[in-house]
Amino acid sequence: MELLILSIFTFFFLSRAELPGTWDLLVPNAGISSMHTAVTRFNTVVLLDRTNTGPSRKMLRKGHCRLDPHDAVLKRDCYAHSVLFDLQTNQIRPLMILTDTWCSSGQFLHDGTLLQTGGDLDGFKKIRKFDPCDINGSCDWVELDDVELSEGRWYASNQILPDGSVIIIGGRGANTVEYYPPRNGAVLFPFLADVEDKQMDNLYPYVHLLPNGKLFVFANNKAVLFDHETNKVVKGYPPLDGGPRNYPSAGSSVMLALEGDYSTAVIVICGGAQYGAFIERSTDTPAHGSCGRIVATSPDPIWEMEDMPFGRIMGDMVMLPTGDALVINGAQAGTQGFEMASNPCLYPLLYRPGQPVGLRFMTLNPGTVPRLYHSTANLLPDGRVLVAGSNPHFFYKFEAEFPTELRIEAFSPEYLSPDRANLRPVIEEIPDTVRFGEAFDVFVSVTLPVVGLIEVNFASAPFATHSFSQGQRLVKLTIKPSVPDSGNRYKIGCNAPPNGAVAPPGYYMVFAVNQGVPSVARWVHLVA
C-alpha cells in the first residue's frame, strides 16, 4: 500500500513538472482583491474592487478618507479599494475611488485614458476616468460630475468603436445601449430582454467589434449582429448548444486574431454553468466543458462544437501574442455568485486555433491558488499573464475554504521557457505612433538566424472582469519578409491596421513573434 501511494504521488508531481508553463508569485499581498484589472501603457496595472467591502488590507494616503453616510460598514472609509501596481518594481500605490464600482465595466479610450462606468448604489450611473501615469506619478481616479450614464449600469459591457467612442451595452434591468461621449441617451436593445431567463443569464454580454464595423453581441445562448450606427440588429445567429454562457452562468469568450485581408472574424465561447445552478445555489453542479466556435462574418454561420479537457465556470480567456488563447482561472462546479462554486480548476489550457477539432486544447502546468469568483487575467507586455483577485465572499474573508485572495501571480506560457530564449526577438526600433494604413519599419534583433517570417502583432489592453476581457483584440499585421540589417539585426516592413474597424484607435502592445516566441512588447499609439 505504501508503495502504491508513493507511486501515485510520484506520478502526480512528475506529470505536473512535465506540463508546459511556469508560475511566479509577484506580490504576496496587493492590499485589495482585484475584481477588475487593466494594464496601462506605462507598464502599470490598475486593480479595482468595489467600495463597500469593508476594510481592505491597504490604507489610503493620510487624510484621504472616503466619507459615505450610506455605507453599511464604514461611514468613514480610510481603506483603498483600488491600487496601481508597477510591473518593474512590484511597488503598489493606493488609489482613491469614491463611488461603488461593484460589477462595473470599462474600456481604454483612444488617448489611453481608462473609462470606467456604472456599478451599484451611488455608482449606478457614474462615469469615471483614470489617466495613467508611472508609479511615481500622482494620477488617480476622477469621478465626472458634469455627465452621467443615461441609465444605471450594473453588469454591463463596454467596447471601443472605430471612431474612438465607446458603446456601453446592457446591465441588470437595462436592456439598452448608450455611448460615451453621450449620443442621444439610452437606446432600446430588445435582444437583451428576449434572452433573459429566470436567473438572468444576459448580464456582461460578450461584445466583439468585427472588422466589418458591426458588433457581435452574445448573451445567454444567442447572438446577434448589431449596427451601432443605426442601433439596429441586422442579423441573428444560430443558438449555441450547451446552456447559458453569460453571467451568472459565464464561461468566457474571445475573438481570434484578425489577419490576412481582415475580412474574417472567428468567435470562440467556452464553458459555463448548467441552467438552474444559480437559482438552486448549487455549488456542486458540474460546469460545462463545451466550446462553440463560429465564423461571425460568414453569410451562413454555424457553431462548431468541441470539448475542453475540464468543465469550467468563470474561466478567463486571454489572447496571447502568438494568436493562441489561454484559458485560466475558474471552477469545475457551481456557478457565479458569492460562495456558489467548488472544485477549483487549477489547470490552464492552451487553445491552438490552427489545430483540428480534438487537438486544439493542451493542458498546462497547474497553479496552486484557487481563482474563483471575482478573479482576473491579463496579458502583460513581457508575454506573461497576470492573474489576480478571487473573492467569493461578500466581505473580505480569510478564514475559509476559498479565502479572499490578495496574491498577484504571473503565468509564463511555454514560449518563455529558457530553451527558447535564443529565438526571442528584441524590438530595437519602432515608431511611437502610426496611422491607419501607414507603412512603417520595425527593427528587431534575434540571437539565432531567422528562419521564416517574424510576425508583428498588435494586442489591445482590455478591461478584464467577470470572466470576460472587454475590448480584447489581437491584430496580425501584413508584413514583408525580414531583411538582414547588420549582425543579428533585421528590418521588417509592416502595414498598420487599415481602419478603426480592424483596430480601433488607441495604445497597443506591439509584439514581434519569431517561430512562436514573442518579444517584450513596445507600446504604440494607433491614430486616424
Image (cartoon, rainbow, N blue to C red):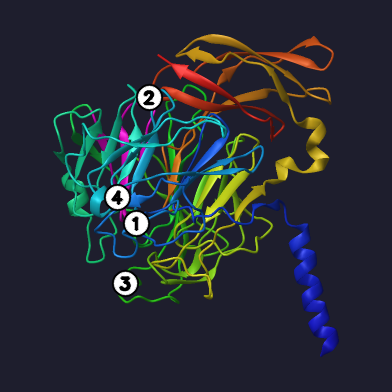
Give x and y (percent) for residue 484: 78, 11
In the picture shown, does residue 389 fall above or below 169?
Answer: below
The dominant secondary structure in magenta is strand
Instruction: Give the CA distance from mark 1 to mark 2.
Output: 46 Å
**Labels 4, 3: front one:** 4
**Labels 1, 2: front one:** 1
Instruction: Give the CA distance from mark 4 to mark 2.
Output: 28 Å
**Labels 1, 4: front one:** 1
State left or right for residue 418 relative to residue 99.
Answer: right
Residue at which label 2 appears = 501
Instruction: Give the CA distance from mark 3 to mark 1.
Output: 40 Å
Give x and y (percent) for residue 227: 24, 31
Give x and y (percent) for residue 432: 56, 15
Residue span colored magenta: 204-228
State left or right for residue 45 relative to residue 67.
Answer: right
Residue depicted at 38% across the width and 36% down the height = 107
Three-letter residue code for mark 2: Ala
Residue at which label 1 appears = 76
In which quadrant is the C terminus drawn?
Answer: top left
Residue at which label 3 appears = 276
Judging depth in this view, the residue of 481 and 249 nearest the camera is 249
Three-letter residue code for mark 1: Arg
Residue at which label 4 appears = 119
Q: Secondary structure at mark 2?
A: loop
Residue count near mark 2 (Cα–Cα under 10 Å), binned few <14, some 14–19, many ≥20: many
Instruction: Give the CA distance from mark 2 to mark 3.
Output: 38 Å
Q: Quadrant of residue 55?
A: bottom left
Question: Which badge, 4 or 3, is on the more N-terminal residue?
Answer: 4
Give x and y (percent) for residue 349: 60, 54
Residue count near mark 3 (Cα–Cα under 10 Å), binned few <14, some 14–19, many ≥20: some
Three-letter residue code for mark 3: Gly
Three-letter residue code for mark 4: Gly
